Image (cartoon, rainbow, N blue to C red):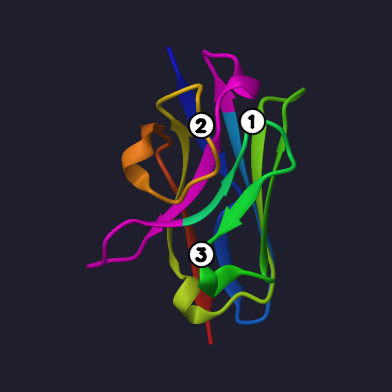
């Protein structure tokens, strides 16, 4: 069965960095687009970054452009999110997700994803 397992969250001060990882199993990792989402208390889950099946196509929400980088290692079945210049408003539970369809392009729309990890908490203090 499809499993996604995030790691790398933690507590950092504003301006710091974290690298999230998402280990995937149970399917051919390289065949699907992947994404990172986050959800803060009382807010809707929002798309942060998406990546195509290879490594060349990516998309980001405006608030993280230039600070976050999504990448993937298809040989290791792992998705990454490098987060730099973190701000308190980045505080949230972060989730990785896999698209429903093989026919995919990078997207921040959660309706295109049907498998989700359990989440990893990121807390940024000022």
Residue visible at 57% across and 69% down in the picture: 64
Q: On the picture, is 112 further left or further right than 19? A: left
Residue shown at 60%/72% (left/top)? 12
Q: Residue at x 54, y 38 (%)?
A: 105
Say few, some or many: other residues with alpha carbon within 10 Å of mark 1 (under 14 / 14 to 19 / 20 or more): many
Residue shown at 58% from the left, 54% from the top: 59
* Dot placed on the residue nearer the N-terminal end, 2 or 1: 1
Would you say the residues marked 2 and 1 are in contact, meaning their CB atoms lie under 8 Å apart? yes
Q: Are marks 3 and 1 in contact (CB under 8 Å)?
A: no
**Residue 85 falls in image quadrant:** bottom right
Q: Is residue 58 magenta?
A: no
Residue where numbered disc 1 is placed: 53
Residue at numbered disc 2:
104
> Residue 53 placed where, x, y %?
64, 30
Q: What distance separates the C-alpha of mark 2 from that of mark 1? A: 8 Å
Q: Is residue 114 above or below residue 90?
A: above
Q: Residue furthest left?
A: 42
Q: Secondary structure at mark 3?
A: loop
For the residues labelled 2 and 3, the Cα–Cα distance comes to 18 Å
User: Mark 2 or mark 3, which has the lower sequence index?
Assistant: 3
Horizontal and vertical percent for residue 41? 28, 66
Q: Magenta segment: does it hold 41? A: yes
Percent x, y of residue 115: 39, 29
User: Is residue 27 rendered to the left or right of residue 46?
Assistant: right
How much space separates mark 3 and mark 1, taking CA atoms? 19 Å
Label 2, residues with CA under 10 Å away: few <14, some 14-19, many ≥20: some
Which quadrant of the view contains residue 21?
top right
Precedes in sequence: disc 3 or disc 1: 1
**Quadrant of image for the N terminus:** top left
Residue to which mark 3 is pinned: 61
Q: Nearer the viewer, mark 2 or mark 3?
A: 2
Q: Nearer the viewer, residue 106 or 121?
A: 106
């Amino acid at each position: 069965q499809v499993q996604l397992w995030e790691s790398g969250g933690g507590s950092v001060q504003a301006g710091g960095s974290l690298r999230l990882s998402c280990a995937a199993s149970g399917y051919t990792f390289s065949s699907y687009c992947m994404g990172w989402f986050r959800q803060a208390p009382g807010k809707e889950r929002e798309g942060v970054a998406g990546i195509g099946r290879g490594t060349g196509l990516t998309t980001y929400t405006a608030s993280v452009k230039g600070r976050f980088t999504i990448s993937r290692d298809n040989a290791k079945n792992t998705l990454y999110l490098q987060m730099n210049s973190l701000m308190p408003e980045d505080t949230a539970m972060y989730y990785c997700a896999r698209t429903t369809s093989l026919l995919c392009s990078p997207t921040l729309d959660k309706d295109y994803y049907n498998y989700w990890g359990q989440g990893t908490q990121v807390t940024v203090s000022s």
